Amino acid sequence: MASRKEGAGSTASSSSSAAGVAGKGKGKGGSGDLAVKQVQIDGLVVLKIIKHYQEEGQGTEVVQGELWGLVLEDWLEITNCFPFPQHTEDDADFDEVQYQMEMLQSLCHVNVDHLHVGWHQSTYYGSFVTRALLDSQFSYQHAIEGSVVPIYDPIKTAQGFLSLRAYRLTPKLMEVCKEKDFPPEALKKANITFEHMFEEVPIVIKNSHLINVLMWELEKKSAVADKHELLSLASSNHLGKNLQLLMDRVDDMSQDTVKYNTYMRNTSKQQQQKHQYRQQENMQRQRRPVQTLQTAAAPARMDSLLIAGHINTYCQNVKEFTAQNLGKFFMAQALQEYNN
């Protein structure tokens, strides 16, 4: 997997190689059409994912890793994971494929579930809908039936709400991604919008009975925390950051719309020029050789869909945050009126 200092382009190519290794370990590839209705993940795997980000994640940098487990009919069980090594461009001798093969052999040696079932990634304020993630998940889902990508949000988790959601590419998007091109006609024909790009799979966290008993004992022994901050009316910077990111994505969408409108105007002008040229050609066919007019290539529309997905994610975050704050304000207003 690409290092966090290399950029998004390397992430997609490295994920493709990881999917190829997983396909070899599994013994066959899939088309990604297996319907997964539920993901069951062990609590230890969740703790490993959180620990991985705490140790190696910094700010906007993301961390990634592989998931191992079992596929049982229409639900997926994740029983183990390990992080992708973080390295820089200076580590030219590091072989990612060899590292993954060695990990696969080690898991087989200790008799641990070694079926590759996907990969995980962290996100920064929900900004995970990127071209790199799209290409990576397509490679995994094309090679491994039922593969998922759980997205861990450390910002929400730090506020007391565990944010871990599993996603898959929809069958419509899988068909379009096979063409390796995203012209406006293909997306329009497939009727794909940002709402039809990813499908969320419910996650169920499972712990053994002994772990549940231990957690119950620790909760009894732990000191009672001061919960008055839950009623605080002060707004954190979470809302401001989401609004700032939302405005940035709206600007990107506006620029992309301007580019597409410019392309449509140029195309219209070229059609008019073609019509005029054909009329002149019919009149002067014997005087000059036949010439052709170059037509500009249509801009890819996948970037617009990804930006729209970002905007939708930020709007949902703002909606959740404001709903909680509005509840606090109404409660405070009712208490104030009652006291007066």
Image (spheres, rainbow, N blue to C red):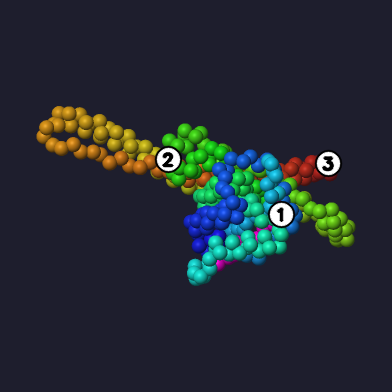
Q: Which residue is mark 1?
A: 79
User: Which percent across, then down, holds residue 64?
Assistant: 60, 58
Crowd around label 2: few <14 · some 14–19 · many ≥20 (10 Å): some
Tell me the distance, in whole angstroms, between the alpha carbons under discs 3 and 2: 61 Å
> Residue at horizontal 78%, vertical 43%?
331
Kindly indicate the quadrant of the structure image that contains residue 334.
top right
Q: Which tag, 1 or 2, sits closer to the chain's start?
A: 1
Amino acid type of the residue that numbered disc 3 sits on in the rendered structure:
Tyr
Relative to 21, 109 lies left or right: right
SS for callout 3: helix
Quarter of the image for the N terminus: give it: bottom right
> Residue at horizontal 65%, vertical 42%?
36
Q: Which tag, 3 or 2, sits closer to the chain's start?
A: 2
Relative to 204, 211 lies left or right: right
> Residue at horizontal 63%, vertical 40%?
35
Q: Mark 3 against mark 2, which lies toward the viewer?
A: 2
Q: Which residue is mark 2?
A: 183
Answer above or below: position of 110 versus 133.
below
> Residue at horizontal 56%, vertical 64%?
98
Q: Which residue is mark 3?
A: 338
Q: From the viewer's side, name the closer residue of 137 and 117.
A: 117
Judged by its main secondary structure, the magenta piece is strand
Magenta highlight on residue 83: yes
User: Which percent across, then down, holds residue 135?
Assistant: 51, 50
Q: Which residues are magenta?
A: 78-87
- Dots 3 and 2: beta carbons under 8 Å? no
Relative to 172, 228 lies left or right: right
Q: From the viewer's side, name the closer residue of 325 and 193.
A: 193
Amino acid type of the residue that numbered disc 1 sits on in the rendered structure:
Thr
Count the marks.
3
Any part of residue 329 in sight: no
Amino acid type of the residue that numbered disc 2 sits on in the rendered structure:
Pro
